[in-house]
Amino acid sequence: MPAISIWMIRLSFLFFLITVISGAILLLNKAFQFHPGIWALLPIHIEVAMLGWVLQFVLGTAYWMFPRFLEGPARGNIKAAIWMVVFLNSGILLSAFAMGNEWVLFTGRILLSAGVVIFVLIIRNRVVSYRNLQD
């Protein structure tokens, strides 16, 4: 398994842990009503669950599972893959912890989108039928 996939899957499990903890706090607050301000965790819980855990796990697994190149680096440009992970995680953190600041949320979404676009650019050249390459 490539190092990029390992880091993405590890980070997705970290986000899963944050998701579980914030979800448990929300459920306990629903049952025992500690403080009404705890419901401010709900957007963080949703962002971290959907983007940090699910999206990052899927992209990390796809980066590993898609076909490798026959020549050159097996999975393409490693620097682009590193930037993908940096943009993706920066975007997730900014989006999750924007706390109502629209510019921080917008910046997070742009970084998140940039990470996904880089992923698509890395993967699209690996999705090819080798039957079409035979002359």
Image (cartoon, grey):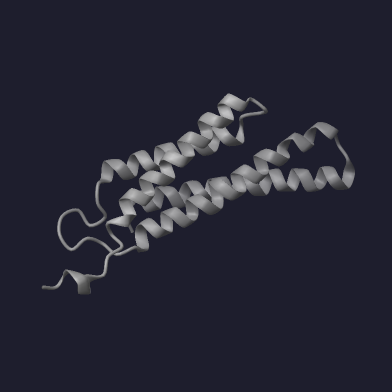
Q: Is residue 38 above or below residue 17?
A: above
The quadrant where residue 30 appears: top right
Question: Quadrant where the C terminus lies?
Answer: bottom left
The residue located at (37%, 51%) in the rendering is: 120
Quarter of the N terminus within the rendering: bottom left
Left or right side of 91 for 7: left
Q: Can you say whether 36 is above or below 55 in the image? A: above
User: Horizontal placement of 82 versus 43: left or right?
Assistant: left
42 shown above or below 6: above
Residue 117, position in %: x, y? 40, 45
Residue 2, can we see it? no
Q: Is residue 123 visible?
A: yes
Q: Position of residue 101 (x, y in %)?
A: 63, 25
Query: Vertical placement of 110 versus 77: above or below?
Result: above
The one nearer the camera, 19 or 106, is 106
- State the residue at coordinates (87%, 48%): 31
Residue nearest the viewer, comparing 109 with 8: 109
7 or 103, which is in the foreground? 103
Name which residue lies at 39% across and 52% down.
6
